[in-house]
Amino acid sequence: MKSLTNYLDLSRQFAAIRERVHETDRSSAALAISSAIVALLVISPMLWLVLRATEVEPSRAYSLIVSGRTAWVTVNSIVLMALVTLFSIVLGVPLAVLTTRTDLPYPRFWTVVAALPLVIPSYIGAIAFVGMFGSGGEVDTLFGTTLPTIDGLSGAIFIITLYTYPYVFLTARAALLSMDSSIVDAARTLNAGPLEAFRRVTFPQIRPGIAAGALLAGLYAISDFGTPAFMGANVFTSRIYWETTGFGREYAALLALQLVAIVAIVLVIEAGIGRDEDATGGGGEGSTIRLGNWKWPAMGVVSLLGVLTLVVPVAIFTRWLLYSEGDRIPAYEFQWEFAFNSVHLALLAALVACAFALPVAYYSGRSNSVVSRILERATYVGFAVPGVVIGLALVFMGNRLLPSLYRQGIWLLVFAYVVRFLPQVVGTVRSSVLQVDDKTIEAARTLNAGPLEAFRRVTLPLIMPGVIAGGVLVFLTTMKELPVTLMLRPIGMETLVSIIWNAQDAIAYRYAAIPSLLLIFISGLSMLILLRQEGNDVG
């Protein structure tokens, strides 16, 4: 009798185990299907763009692609990307060395100053510099054309470099902090000077970090819309926008595919350059380079960059706010409705992005399968593709499939934001999922909690900080997104960025002052979120 009882107990235990396995399989299948649906939604704009481009008659497509204006746009875009990348390296790497390998006073303070340009969207700096120093700007009007103006392709290169070199600075600085400094000291003992030691020892070690930062700077440069548009530079992003708003959508689609192809080529090149087989870890303490009297010029250079990128734009906008005169334009006067619209759209985008990211991030974090990795990477497509291309693709989709939604509703615009910034939530949530102890979930399952119940009561509270952090990042970056907002916002709906665009287009810069200062404040909040997240990761 006792053996029969034991047998029945074992049978019940095995049955419970089989049921939990079946529940786990069903939940995994549901997660995979949900992730696949999200991934398909994210890549659907690009698929639609390719489909729209293939509808162009081959002979017409060929004539458009090989035309002189296409060649000019291509050359300008490549020059913009190449020079911004080069100048970002020239600025970022020495600054990284200054703040990590020298006796520069107050290195933490100068690190913050050197990273400050990331606080401001480049188009905010562009409108400030164009309004003051561009052709027809206040300085040009006051002193005539004897002074060089900041506009055109050269002006775009200058402004974008000022606001993208921190990518190289931060990645190179991280590489310097993590490398083994003792090998540099060994090179110095063999009578190698500082420059020779850097070229032969340090540079190979930090090359992957420099390549990663250069990739970010280059991709930002070729995908930036606002700065080239404000500067009057004829590059891919500005040309795509103008063709979309005009009658050249076929041409815009072909340009968009060319731009995506260039981005893909850049990613492939970076994958080759940025290999880290030469890099070694360690982070050991090494000797410090003595600057002597050169520390004063060094601090002066870093101070000048901080003044140019933050103090000058804020001062210019403040001046326009307080002292500018001219004909009153009621439509451009600041209204809190503009800020409300921006907040409303950003909040919706953050909520939808969090809902989309949960199944993808959880499936990727709990599974090591190839399918989970592919689906997760598919959600990054919108982040790698320039915003103007996403906007163009959804313009095509909206006109063809959802005309009423495109012309009247805000949900197509919210969807565009989600496609653009979904990786920000996927990344933070996946990191939180990876930190959840499997034993905690198994303990909940042993108490007869199903997969959904265990997720709701155990996993979700643990990963909620990551969900909130990702949602906040989506909210803040959505507030600053320019091309997608301009291309998809409903008629008559104005936001902070659209008012900035309208004020610049009408050369009524004073009306851009309040929205721009608000966006600078919002950008500062996003920087604080990133720094806090970095501190948590280090901890």
Image (spheres, rainbow, N blue to C red):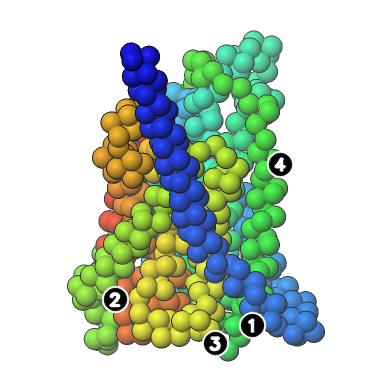
Instruction: Give coordinates of residue 136: x percent, y percent.
Output: 45, 78
**Which mark, residue 272?**
4
Give SS at disc 4. helix
Task: Name the residue carrying label 2.
Answer: 511
Judging depth in this view, the residue of 345 and 211 nearest the camera is 345
How far apart are the alpha carbons under marks 4 and 3?
40 Å
**Contact (CB < 8 A) between labels 4 and 3?**
no
Chain-order first, disc 4 or disc 2: 4
Q: Are marks 4 and 1 in contact (CB under 8 Å)?
A: no
Give the number of the disc on residue 336.
none
**Of the residues shown, which amino acid type is indicated by label 2?**
Tyr
Circle nearer the N terminus (4, 3): 3
Say which of marks 2 and 1 sits in front: 1
Q: Hey, what amino acid is under mark 1? A: Glu
Q: CA distance from mark 1 to mark 3?
A: 11 Å
Going by the image, does 333 lie left or right of 246?
Answer: left
Q: Residues within 10 Å of mark 3 (few under 14, many from 20)?
A: few
Question: Residue 386 vs residue 314: left or right?
Answer: right
Question: Which dot, 2 or 3, sits closer to the camera?
Answer: 3
